[in-house]
Amino acid sequence: MPLELVIATRNRKKIEEIKRILQGVPVALFALDDVPGCPEVEEDADTFEGNAVKKALAVARYSGKPAIADDSGLEVYALNGAPGVWSARYAGADADDRKNLEKLLSELRGVEEEKRGARFVCCVALAFPDGRVETFPGFVGGRIGTEPKGFSGFGYDPVFYPKGHDKTFAEMSADEKDALSHRGVALRKLRIYLSSFIVG
């Protein structure tokens, strides 16, 4: 029997990304929609790790199955680390990707290319119903462009150029992005842990 895991998100693109990177690990993955009545978890911690742990623990305790959650976002050095943990709500509580991107580019208007450094940060948390938690961090450095480019990915992908590349995440294939991304780094650490956990 494969280990059953609940992915604590309703974001379809994020679920696809997690499933791609964990492919081949003997786990059965369920989405939040497969857990009727699961309460929404307010992401009010002041760190990515705090939010990921809070979500994973709440879903694991409610579902009775281990749960994985991630919190991730963009830290722009010229903006003192903003949007940070507010990345998904940067332009307000009801903001969408387009509004968040517009606000970010507006805040960076006039900032020279060499001062547009940034990094994507991710923390993946694996929580068990008994309260045990493991966390897996991931980072990728790069810079912010001056206009959106590309149509893949989500969030700030259209303006983020990973270090050493002249394509944004949104211009890359899923495999190219997975090989570089903050979430890819964190999920590969989770993958190694799950493989040894299941075998062990």
Image (spheres, helix red, strand yellow):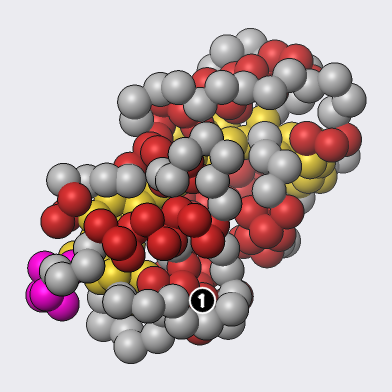
In the rendered view, would you say 85 is above or below 164?
Answer: above
Give the answer, above or below, for where 75 lies relative to 47: below
Percent from the top left, x then y, of residue 64?
Answer: 78, 18
Q: How many labels does the image show?
A: 1
Identify which residue, 113 or 185, lies in the foreground. 113
- Left or right: where 16 falls relative to 184: right
Q: Quadrant of residue 101?
A: bottom left
Q: Give the range drawn in magenta.
A: 112-116
The amino acid type found where label 1 is placed reads Ala
Query: Considering depth in this image, is 38 or 125 the residue closer to the camera?
Result: 38
Can you identify the residue that label 1 sits on? Answer: 170
Which residue is depicted at the point 76% across and 50% down? 26
Q: Where is residue 184? Give x, y as percent.
A: 49, 60
Q: Is any atom of residue 5 visible in this view?
A: no
Image quarter (top left, top right, bottom left or bottom right) of the N terminus:
top right
The answer to whether residue 171 is magenta is: no
